[in-house]
Amino acid sequence: MASMRDETARPSGSIDDEIAALRAIVEGTARSKGEAFFESLVRHLALTIGVNHAFVAEFADDVKRARTLANWGHGEILANLEFELAGTPCEDVVRGGLCHHPLGVHAKFPLDRDLADLGIESYLGVPLLDGAGKVLGHLAVYDERPMPPEPRKLFIFRIFAARAAVELERLKVEKRLVESERRYRELYEEAPNAYVSLGEDLRPISVNRRATQLLDRPAEELLRASILDRFADTPSGRARAERAFRECLAGEEISGLELEMRRRNGDALWITAWIRPMRGDRGRPEAVHSIWLDVTDRVLAEAESARLAEQNSYLRQEINAVHNFEEIVGRSAAIGSVLDKVRRVAPTDTTVLILGETGTGKELIARAIHSASRRADKPLIKVNCAALPAGLVESELFGHEKGAFTGAIARRAGRFEIADGGSIFLDEIGELPAEAQAKLLRILQEHEYDVVGGRTSKKVDVRVIAATNRDLVKAVGERSFREDLYYRISVFPIQLPPLRERTDDIPLLASFALENAAARVGRRFKGIAPETMRRLVAYPWPGNVRELENVVERAVILSAGPVLNVDPDTLRLPVAEESAETSSSLEQVERDHILAALRKAAWVIEGPRGAAAALGLHPNTLRSRLKKLGISRPAHETS
């Protein structure tokens, strides 16, 4: 440490000297701020008051500790330090008052070892107060010599304590502003919405991270070109966007405007934009600020919904044209009786039960009933009860709410809700589980149902058309089908005859099937070979009309000439069946035919090579026929 001065009292000097010193402090601190200001302050203050030490300090993490902002000692700036206030002269200063110890300071504060080590004799300190009188820190000078009271120097000391307080408060405000700006920048950059500010030329001034993500372009690229380049060249894109931005630059605010943009890969990007003008110093709009709630998914979903609605309308018209009951093929008395019933029941809202074997055209009759009803302009919803997953039958029929069960991530409308106002065709109704039967009965009785996971009942206006190939009376007796439901759905039963009971219609049906199949494959035929037609009429058709259509379509593909020929093996019957005299019955013919198909398929029922596919039957239908005909696999044919 530099040598100590004489410890006698120092002359106060002239007023001119003090004014000169004051000017030096003012000039030394006027052009500086922050660290440079505080260093200049303590240096000039020490020289002016004539002491060896000066420092300015602020509170550290709490009011019990302080840290120096600038520290002067023996002619140089020293390293800043942090220290406890307790037991030091500074402790009095932070309470808000002047602290002046002209001499003997180290003896008064024996716990302050720094004072003793330096041999400090005197100390003068004042608090640094903000505009509200709160203590921010303190300014102090101290020396190895006595420091008697000198009013003029104390006045100077207070002036620069006030100046130091202002600078310290400014720094704290600046720090808060920097922190606030940092938080704002983070919020701006990480916001879930895109923020884009544009100049008068509509080039981006600033964009946040979300904007770059939406457009799949880096910020540097977006800032180089007009924002209009990012909009689609459609009526909802560039033209609408430019008009909106120009209106905003004229002083208008735009809210909730949907605009079509393009991502880098060309994919559509739909946004909802909020745009407001940014005014300059003269109050004139000089830029625009816009916020973009990516709504691509919603817009595309609405477009898809509209497309499907149009498609549904088209399909309804097509179905009406193709499946009008007046165009059902057949002239036999059996089919004539069916069509008469269709004409009678169609205009009513009566529940209809269509009975018949697989392939007899139950769905076609259901569509004919709907097309001739007052509900023809509303949908006909088909439900194959046998194909519904066991655990989701009620959800499929009646819908479910979000969270109703594991995997129910969104609300789903059931088939009855979709069919509201129209008709619902419940094919293979005999396969409905018991609980779903109870809910269906409630709809038929009360015209309402409960959504799975819902809390209130829904009203519904739906005509029910049911169909089955099962013996429901037998199912009622076996208690696999509710008796009360059976009576509700069988108000008006329509029994469809199997094809073997309407052989008069086979030539007409075969010709109709040939016309349709030939059109699909792009071929022309003059007709059906007489021998083939004879076989078609004699064949028992266990798969009914569906099997006939399949046989004809297969023959259309395989026939080489202009006349349709069906391979005899396709319709081969046992020898005993060739003669009417030796034929026992149509049931025996059917039995032998099914046996032949089973043996050819190695007794495999399901699958593309199974007997059911070869016969044109549903596997469940074939199993029912096997049970009815008493067919089982012989022991010698099992492996």
Image: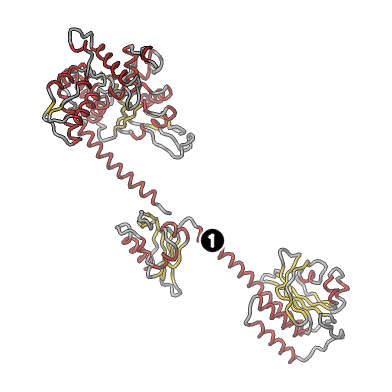
Looking at the image, residue 169 sits to the left or right of residue 243; the answer is: right
State which quarter of the image contains the C terminus.
Answer: top left
Mark 1, other Cα within 10 Å: few <14 / some 14–19 / many ≥20: few
Residue 490 visible within the image: no
Q: In this view, does 508 lie above or below 576?
A: below
Looking at the image, residue 188 sits to the left or right of residue 484; the answer is: right
Residue 237 visible within the image: yes
At which x and y percent is residue 409? 46, 39
At which x and y percent is residue 512? 16, 28
Q: Is mark 1 on a helix, strand or loop?
A: helix
Front position in the image: 424 or 388 = 388
Front position in the image: 19 or 355 = 355
Residue drawn at point x = 39 percent, y = 55 percent: 271
Residue drawn at point x = 31 percent, y = 16 percent: 625
- The residue to which callout 1 is attached is 186
At which x and y percent is residue 377? 25, 35
| Corner quadrant of residue 157 | bottom right
Front position in the image: 374 or 585 = 585
Residue drawn at point x = 42 percent, y = 67 percent: 223
Front position in the image: 131 or 600 = 600
State which quarter of the image contains the N terminus.
Answer: bottom right
Looking at the image, residue 61 sits to the left or right of residue 276; the answer is: right
| Colour pattern | secondary structure
Q: Is residue 209 above or below residue 603?
A: below
| Corner quadrant of residue 319 | top left
At which x and y percent is residue 272? 39, 55
| Corner quadrant of residue 627 | top left
Q: Is residue 289 above or below residue 41?
A: above
Give the residue type that dot 1 points to. Answer: Glu
